[in-house]
Image (spheres, rainbow, N blue to C red):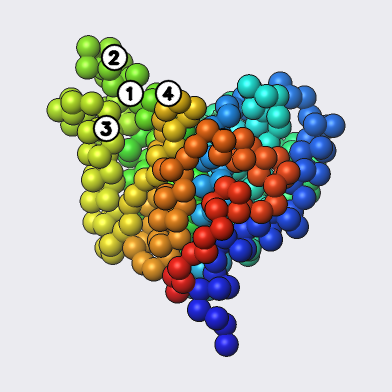
Amino acid sequence: MRKKGEEFDPLKWLPKKLDKTLIGEYIKRIEANFDKNELYRAHLWTPLKLIALMWWLTIYSRIVPRYFSSYWYIDLLASSGANVIEETGDVILGSPLLSYLIPYEPFKRHIFVELDPQKRRTLDKMLRHFKFSNYDILEGDCNEKVYDIPLNDIDHYFCFIDCEGLEVKLSTLEYLLRYRGDILFVFQTSGVNRVFSKAKRGYNMRALDDFCGGNWWQSCNDVKNLLSQYMIRVKQRADSLRGFENFVDYVRVKGRGGGFVYEVILICRKGDYVKAWLDLKRKLEALEDKDVNIALKICKGELKTLDEFFGQRTLDSFF
Ligand SMILES: C[S@@+](CC[C@H](N)C(=O)[O-])C[C@H]1O[C@@H](n2cnc3c(N)ncnc32)[C@H](O)[C@@H]1O
């Protein structure tokens, strides 16, 4: 009989996958075959959100395939497939490639949406280069293209929404919330704050109206308040649209010296498996500067164990 908790422990399973995946080899091939200028320019704190993505891809792919047969990966802001870290020049794999390499059970299909034609072309070239199949790339604004995804035909989805700013409207999120799925949403707190400060003075209010799904943000005092109101609204919408209770929570990621902040929000059905999220949350919230370099090493395939990042503690059984 399976030992309770052991088989599902992402702290044991994700390192095994990182070890087998040979991330470093993929990176070498990207460096040899792609112009760095075609890749997305990211920053030192990007690996942290990718670790959150890998973490939840691990959990998701161990659990959801047991209950559903048709589960798709959706990347609303997919970009080119790989990132260059501006501060160091390092190349790391982006979310589209990780959606193939990390899951325990492969997704049945991958849907990528990208606005920039050049990034879309590079992504297509990269997926073909690595012989990944079962995908569609939709070129255009994800707030329009989302309605072309045949969500009625599938059982479940994993959607990664990796915002640069306020590009994803609340109405887009609400549309996804009508269907069963897990959503990982990067809420760019620092970027939202900049727009919020200007909007409070009457500039570019439309962008915040779209992002928030109304003008309720006008009654917020600061971005912290805006974030908590946003979370409450998302939870209410998810519960009412789906007809079951959802888990809506965020983990805060701070850049060096705390000068830059984003949140990674998880929306999924409330259940035992969210305990694994709380572990990630504890770690990311206690982040030290040295962890940023450790996270980069993990994303470069140089560190195959997560011990240095998460510490030696083992997870509680969550099943
Ligand atoms: C932060 S990057 C995504 C990086 C990617 N998740 C990765 O890990 O490599 C955001 C991408 O969204 C694209 N984008 C911006 N606005 C968009 C929109 N409205 N619809 C679709 N894509 C958009 C940008 O061109 C950019 O490539």
Sequence-first tag of 1 and 2: 1
Q: Is residue 97 left or right of residue 257?
A: right
Residue that numbered label 2 is attached to:
198
Circles 2 and 4, Cβ within 8 Å, touching? The answer is: no
Separation (CA) of disc 1 from disc 4: 12 Å
User: Which marked residue is nearer to the observer: mark 1 or mark 4?
Assistant: 4
Separation (CA) of disc 3 from disc 4: 15 Å
How far from the left and from the top, in percent, is residue 215? 20, 28
Residues packed near mark 4 inside 10 Å, few (<14), some (14 to 19) or many (20 plus): few
Sequence-first tag of 1 and 4: 1
Given residues 181 and 190, the one toward you in this image is 190
Q: Residue furthest front?
A: 312
Residue that numbered label 3 is attached to:
224
**Is disc 2's CB within 8 Å of ligand 1?**
no
Separation (CA) of disc 2 from disc 4: 19 Å
User: Which marked residue is nearer to the observer: mark 1 or mark 2?
Assistant: 1
Q: Quadrant of residue 119?
A: top right
